[in-house]
Image (spheres, rainbow, N blue to C red):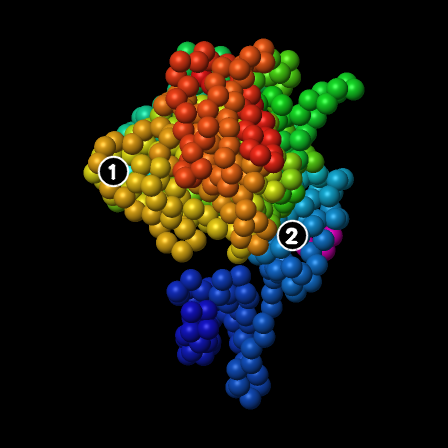
Amino acid sequence: MIKSTLIACLLFISQSIFSQESINASGSEATGSGGAVSYSVGQVFYSTQTGSNGTLSEGVQQPDAKTIYIFNSTWMPSNPNGTATAADDIVIASGDATIDANTTTNTVTINPGAGLIIDPGMTLSTTNGLMLESSSTNYSSLILDGIVTGTLEYERHVNINGSGTTGSNDLISAPLTGEVFSDFATNNPNIFNNGTLYLFGPFEKVTGTFVTWTDTETATLDPGVGFRAASSDNGSFVFNGTANNGIVFNDIINSGSNNEEWNLIGNPYPSYLNVQAFLNHDVDDTAAVVTNLQLFDTGTAAIYGYDGNAQNGWTIYNLANTTASTLIAPGQGFFVSADPTNAALYDLQFTPAMRSTGSGDDFIAGRNAELTFVKLNASTATNSYNTEFYFNANATPGYDFGYDARAWDDASSDFAIYSNLVEDNTGHPIALQTLDIDNLIEVTIPLGVNANQGEQLTFSIADTTLPASVSVYLEDAVANTSTLLNNSDYVISPTTALSGTGRFFLRTSDDALSTIETNLDALNIFALHTSKELVVNGQLQDNTTLALYDIQGRQVLSTELDAALVQNRLDVSILSAGVYVVQLQNNAQNKSQKVIIK
């Protein structure tokens, strides 16, 4: 367009150059005096001169020329550190750029997935501000250890308001803080609202419910606070304010009339947050080691992030399913639970050492391929729900703090799938269960399922990194079937509504490591609290006796197990709740295991 405008201007000037008139046309300006005319197109200045032979010559002047410095893993056309001017622009397109000298510029733009690091003692002076951008699947980062002058803005993508299986709303935090909400609402008319009431607000602890703010709310968007929010257009909210670069404290508490253990917090930095650095950070400045993770309530010692699924609801991060490189996105809110003892003594802490540049999604992202896991899915035509199993050397078949995590709402919804612990089962629905890597050889895990009568239900492997030699079976104790999920889904239409545990089991078997004869160590023993049964799962090769002892060592039950059954069940409803020891014995072997009967 500039080229065509320039040609038009030149033609017009050539016709009028001797008129010594001022010309204004199509955004261009020209002035003439004698045989010379100068004009501009945009910010580029041109001049014409009539020679003695009547010919027209042209020169180009760019007294205010702008350079756009682009970082795409390397700088182009050159490095702007210490050399850029107030007329220049800087764009970080990909990779992580560093400002290591005092630098002046007009604007700075950081594209989604890119990062900018400003070294300590360095100042980046901007005339028209620094903008961080994001998309629905990628976010930009600013690690500020120096100074930025000029405005800071972060365009943070926010999920659209909705319902059903498509999900609804979002959990976010302010990547830049200090802005008053009423100003924020004015600047972001795409916050889902009815004119004065906005779908935006924190999680209030007294009642354990979300707050919905009005357009006159004067609370500030503080660092480390999580908010429920929704956009009307699946677009971005623009945050203005301060880029935090110090320690941020958050006083999580266990109190209230509802959801007393849960606290909605969020990443306080305009950068990604390293998950394991956050979980393992020591909040005690004495000789004791008390980590952020230890401030979380037992059973839910994990990060719970909303995954965009209206049914399943939560992506859970703990030590079982994260690596040293697992990150939380800028402006991301999430729930944590508060232990009533430790959380009352210490504040949760975010520190600058947790900051990281990075790329990728929020909690809707897929799992890390470095981990050994299987994700089991149960679905109907309208619902979908997952439960997860991880295998590593730090876990046991019982409860492991920081590795196992209960379901958010104890799987009380009408449609759900979860598991019970393989050992020391307390009856709590487990959303993420971790077992020892050796359990891959042979383990049976009780599953709980809530589903409607007559509605077709499909069990499938949603994702897995298990070795190819490991077979995953879905066992249905009522239908007396065992389905190899590696090869096909298991589909049923239950004749009665499903609720709780006792019918379905997930079994793994490593064909490369398993022996032909199953010994007692390969049997799984657990209690079903709903049906008040003791279960011994696995194929018996010899006549086997089961004896049950209470905590005082008194025998309360003795029976011969049926070797023809893959699963033996014993009614223990007459026994008092408590801890018991199961002892299995055949002609050559003994096995003892503790169980909890409720």
Q: As rendered, which of 236 and 19 lies closer to the eye?
A: 236
From the image, give the main secondary structure of the stretch colored magenta.
Answer: loop
Q: As rendered, which of 585 and 22 lies closer to the eye?
A: 585
Q: Is residue 92 visible?
A: yes
Of the residues tagged 1 and 2, which is closer to the observer? 1
Q: Secondary structure at mark 2?
A: strand
Quadrant in the picture for the N terminus? bottom left
Q: Residues within 10 Å of mark 1 (few under 14, many from 20)?
A: some
Q: CA distance from mark 1 to mark 2?
A: 54 Å
Q: Residue at x 47, y 41 (%)?
A: 539
- Indicate the quadrant where residue 455 lies: top left
Magenta span of residues? 82-87
Name which of mark 1 and mark 2 comes first in the sequence: 2
Kindly check if marks 1 and 2 are in contact, taking CB atoms under 8 A apart as contact. no
Q: Is residue 503 left or right of residue 183?
A: left
- Residue beneath disc 1: 494
Q: Residue at x 51, y 47 (%)?
A: 509
Q: Is residue 181 visible?
A: no
Q: Secondary structure at mark 1?
A: loop
- Residue beneath disc 2: 96
Q: Is residue 77 left or right of residue 47?
A: right
Q: As rendered, which of 484 and 53 lies closer to the eye?
A: 484
Question: How many numbered badges does the structure rendering display?
Answer: 2
Q: Is residue 428 magenta?
A: no
**Relative image position of residue 190 (x, y in whole percent):** 36, 38
- Indicate the quadrant where residue 191 lies: top left
The numbered disc on residue 585 is none
Relative to 543, is 580 above or below?
Answer: above
Amino acid type, callout 2: Asp
Amino acid type, callout 1: Pro
**Relative image position of residue 437 (x, y in whole percent):** 60, 42
